[in-house]
Image (cartoon, grey):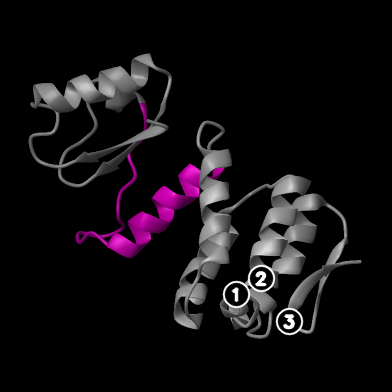
Amino acid sequence: MNALLALLSDGFSASVWTNQEVGVAFGRGKFILSVRLREDPQGFVGKFQALRSKGKNVNVDELCSQITAHLLNHPKTQEKMIASYFSAIRNMASFAESEKWAELLSSIKNVNESQANVLMNAYNDNPQAYGCFLLNGQRGKVSLASRINNWMGEKKYRIRNEKTVRI
């Protein structure tokens, strides 16, 4: 396991099995993320603040975005999550799917140059990615090239004919 996601539903803390799973993850030094559904964090999970949906009803999309943001940026999960995310960009099969994945891009706080090159190649190799207005900047959002420049702290990339190129 790379991380443990604890869904704190009714009876979570009373279960011997869930407590054992959390204890194993804690003992192995794994990233533990909990989501408060109906129960407050207790025991090992109580050491960490639980995510929660705003309001009384659970907003699944909002929680998924929060979970993804944590996994994309936590030192224990960041490298594998970013690699998986960039692989997804390479394999997007529609513009609608591209837009869904593009919205998560703002969750990534930092990438190194090697990761930036992988992302640029994944984007350039997939017409569903470079044709996506949310990624190429045609819909008033920040383009992929601008995001990479922000992560790298310098202007090395730009969009030319919808594709990202190194200047």
Residue 157, compared with residue 95, is above or below; it is above
Residue 105, magenta (yes or no):
no
Residue under numbered circle 1: 129
**Three-letter residue code for mark 1:** Ala
**Three-letter residue code for mark 2:** Asp
Residue under numbered circle 3: 162
Badge nearest the viewer, 1 or 2: 2
133 left or right, relative to 53: right
Q: Secondary structure at mark 2?
A: helix
Task: Report the span colored magenta.
Answer: 48-73
The reply to whether the C-beta atoms of the residues labelled 1 and 2 are less than 8 Å apart is yes
Q: Earlier in the sequence, mark 2 or mark 3?
A: 2
State how far apart marks 1 and 2 are (Cα).
8 Å
Q: Secondary structure at mark 1?
A: helix
Q: Nearer the viewer, residue 55 or 21?
A: 21
Residue under numbered circle 2: 125
State how far apart marks 1 and 3 are (Cα).
9 Å
Where is residue 81 shown, x and y percent of the image? 51, 46
Where is residue 101 shown, x and y percent of the image? 50, 67
118 left or right, relative to 6: right
Residue at (68% x, 85% y) in the render: 138
